[in-house]
Image (tube, helix red, strand yellow):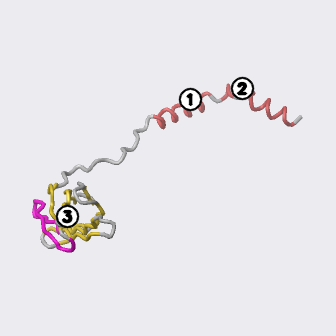
């Protein structure tokens, strides 16, 4: 008996006739909620990452590269046991450290790395 009352009250539309403004307001709110602009996916950096081209590296020997705009990149390569290169980078401007990322890559494989608006890209070539 209670079940029939619940089902009848669930589908009883006589109460809906008394609330058209509420229904219109709910429909309007759902319309605007459905029209929101989606958040942009991982946005590409809006600055140009300097690309140094091919950079010759030797195990354990630091090299210095000009990035322009008063910035430099210090590269310290370490050859790992599996043959990959661990590149410790230091990007500086006027003697002040801006970023110090590390990259694991292979010889002759191009890469780019950036943090905020500081970045660099190049292709390391291991000198034998």
Q: Earlier in the sequence, mark 2 or mark 1?
A: 2
Across and down, in percent, residue 44 comes to 28, 48
Q: Give the quadrant of the C terminus.
A: bottom left
Q: CA distance from mark 3 to mark 1?
A: 70 Å
Q: Give neighbour class at mark 2: few <14, some 14-19, many 20+ (Cα, 10 Å).
A: few
Q: Give neighbour class at mark 3: few <14, some 14-19, many 20+ (Cα, 10 Å).
A: some
- Of residues 57 and 89, the one nearer the viewer is 57
Q: CA distance from mark 2 to mark 1?
A: 16 Å
Query: Which segment is the magenta one?
Result: 59-74
Hey, which quadrant is residue 79 in on the image? bottom left
Q: Give neighbour class at mark 1: few <14, some 14-19, many 20+ (Cα, 10 Å).
A: few
Q: Is residue 3 left or right of residue 124?
A: right
- Of residues 4 and 81, the one nearer the viewer is 81
> Which residue is denoted by mark 3 in the rendering?
126
Q: Give the quadrant of the N terminus.
A: top right
Across and down, in percent, residue 51 comes to 16, 54
> Which residue is denoted by mark 2 in the rendering?
13
> Which residue is denoted by mark 1 in the rendering?
24
Hey, which quadrant is residue 74 in on the image? bottom left
């Amino acid at each position: 008996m209670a079940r029939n009352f619940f089902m009848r009250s669930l589908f009883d539309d006589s109460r809906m006739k008394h609330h058209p403004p509420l229904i219109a307001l709910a429909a309007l709110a759902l319309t605007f909620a459905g029209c929101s602009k989606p958040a942009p996916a991982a946005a590409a950096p809006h600055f140009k990452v300097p690309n140094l081209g091919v950079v010759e590296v030797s195990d354990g020997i630091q090299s210095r590269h000009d990035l322009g705009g008063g910035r430099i990149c210090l590269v310290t390569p370490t050859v790992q046991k599996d043959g990959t290169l661990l590149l410790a980078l230091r990007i500086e401007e006027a003697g002040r450290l801006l970023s110090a990322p590390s990259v694991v890559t292979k010889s002759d494989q191009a890469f780019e790395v950036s943090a905020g608006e500081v970045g660099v890209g190049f292709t390391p070539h291991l000198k034998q």
